[in-house]
């Protein structure tokens, strides 16, 4: 009897033992692709924050490959296959003047995009940028959903001995697949973010206006003509070529320089030409009057006789009053003319200074990955 029960239960125990346990999937964390003026100590701090945040947020095993850097989804998928991982996380960081732009992408080993997140931190020290990076890592891992390996097919159950037929074992119902996140764009489209300064700058793509100051579009494989223009600034134009499916999110920063109107500005600092002419005329009259007054002062007391013995001539020239008046009036006229010229020029310079009090920007752009940030000079 005992042997019969053992023969009955043995196939059931073997079948249960052969049901595979779900193994934790591996998430491969690649090193960040950094651009801009990020110094090495700051980069190391961000790399450390990336690794720690991934290990805290991921449910499965995290494999760190921080020496491997990928700029595209296809490169990340290939790295996942080489390391035997289910999916890979690639990060792009652009830093300029304490302005950080962060883009993260998770793809599976077959190259399918699971989640993408972009974030930024404006005028931040590296410690705040690391906090922003940690939040972005947790968000992109959360949006990717559970990263699980496909369950292997169960091995065939051994056929029981014909005499005692075992009761059928109910197989567990398969769990429903986790819904894939809505990425907001179709397969093959690439998110392109354009940030322009000044904020009044007009952004055009292929001749069509897409925004003012900032724009975000989705585009397929093509070569785009991007133009950024603003009043009293130089116009920026560039071409951006997008590859087919597999392109990582792109951030383009454009900073416009003031227009090359130095000659006009210099001319403006001279002020009203009519006022300058009046001041010059008054000063010129003052110079002539001063010279005449000095001459009269020099003639004062000299003999008025031009013939005979001038030593016996009782008449002498009395020009002191006239010379003093002309000299004083000339000096006053010179001062008045110069004052008019200086006041006119200072008024023009104050007007130019008020017009130039706004931010002055320079051009800087990158069409690969997250990038070049915005800087303002005051």
Image: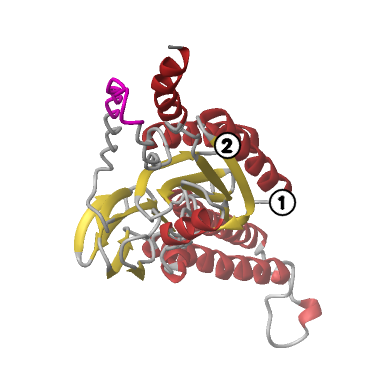
Residue 319 falls inside the magenta stretch: no
User: Which badge, 2 or 1, comes first in the chain's sequence?
Assistant: 1
Query: Residue 129, which numbered label?
Result: 2
Left of 8 or right of it: where is 293? right
Identify the magenta region.
161-175
Residue in front for this viewpoint, 131 or 84: 84
In the image shown, does 239 or 61 lie closer to the viewer? Answer: 61
Say if mark 2 contacts mark 1, CB within 8 Å: no
Asked if 168 appears above or below 181 in the picture, the reply is: above
Q: Nearer the viewer, residue 17 or 69?
A: 17
Q: Residues within 10 Å of mark 1 (few under 14, many from 20)?
A: few
Image side of residue 239 versus residue 253, left or right: left
**Residue appearing at x 44%, y 59% in the figure:** 72
Residue 199 versus residue 23: which sits nearer the camera?
A: 23
Q: Is residue 168 magenta?
A: yes
Q: Residue furthest bottom?
A: 307
Q: Which residue does the numbered mark 1 point to in the structure image?
A: 40
Q: Secondary structure at mark 1?
A: helix
Farthest top residue? 1
């Amino acid at each position: 009897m005992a042997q019969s029960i053992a023969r009955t239960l043995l196939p059931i125990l073997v079948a249960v033992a052969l049901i595979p346990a779900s193994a934790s999937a591996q998430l491969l964390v690649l090193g960040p692709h950094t651009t801009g003026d990020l110094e090495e100590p700051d980069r190391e701090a961000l790399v450390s924050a990336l690794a720690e945040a991934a290990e805290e947020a991921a449910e499965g095993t995290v494999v760190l490959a921080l020496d491997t850097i990928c700029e595209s989804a296809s490169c990340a998928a290939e790295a996942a296959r080489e390391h035997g991982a289910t999916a890979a996380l690639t990060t792009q960081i652009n830093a300029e003047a304490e302005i950080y732009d962060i883009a993260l992408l998770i793809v599976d080993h077959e190259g399918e995009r699971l989640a993408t997140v972009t974030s930024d931190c404006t005028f931040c020290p590296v410690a705040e940028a690391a906090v922003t990076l940690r939040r972005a890592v947790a968000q992109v891992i959360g949006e990717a959903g559970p990263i699980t390996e496909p369950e292997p097919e169960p091995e065939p159950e051994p056929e029981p001995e014909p005499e005692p037929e075992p009761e059928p074992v109910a197989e567990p119902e398969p769990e429903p697949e986790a819904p894939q996140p809505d990425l907001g764009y179709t397969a093959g489209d690439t998110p392109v973010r354009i940030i322009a300064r000044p904020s009044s700058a007009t952004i055009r793509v292929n001749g069509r206006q897409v925004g003012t100051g900032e724009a975000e579009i989705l585009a397929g494989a093509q070569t785009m003509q991007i133009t950024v223009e603003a009043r009293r600034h130089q116009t920026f134009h560039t071409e951006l070529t997008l590859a087919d499916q597999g392109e990582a999110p792109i951030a383009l920063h454009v900073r416009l320089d003031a227009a090359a109107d130095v000659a006009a500005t210099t001319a403006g600092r001279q002020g009203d030409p009519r006022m300058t002419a009046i001041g010059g005329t008054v000063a010129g009259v003052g110079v002539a009057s001063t010279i005449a007054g000095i001459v009269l002062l020099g003639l004062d007391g000299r003999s008025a006789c031009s013939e005979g013995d001038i030593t016996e001539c009782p008449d002498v020239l009395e020009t002191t009053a006239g010379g003093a008046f002309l000299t004083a009036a000339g000096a006053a006229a010179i001062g008045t003319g110069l004052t008019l010229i200086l006041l006119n020029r200072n008024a023009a310079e104050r007007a130019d200074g008020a017009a130039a009090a706004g931010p002055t920007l320079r051009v800087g752009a990158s069409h690969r990955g997250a990038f070049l940030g915005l800087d303002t000079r005051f």
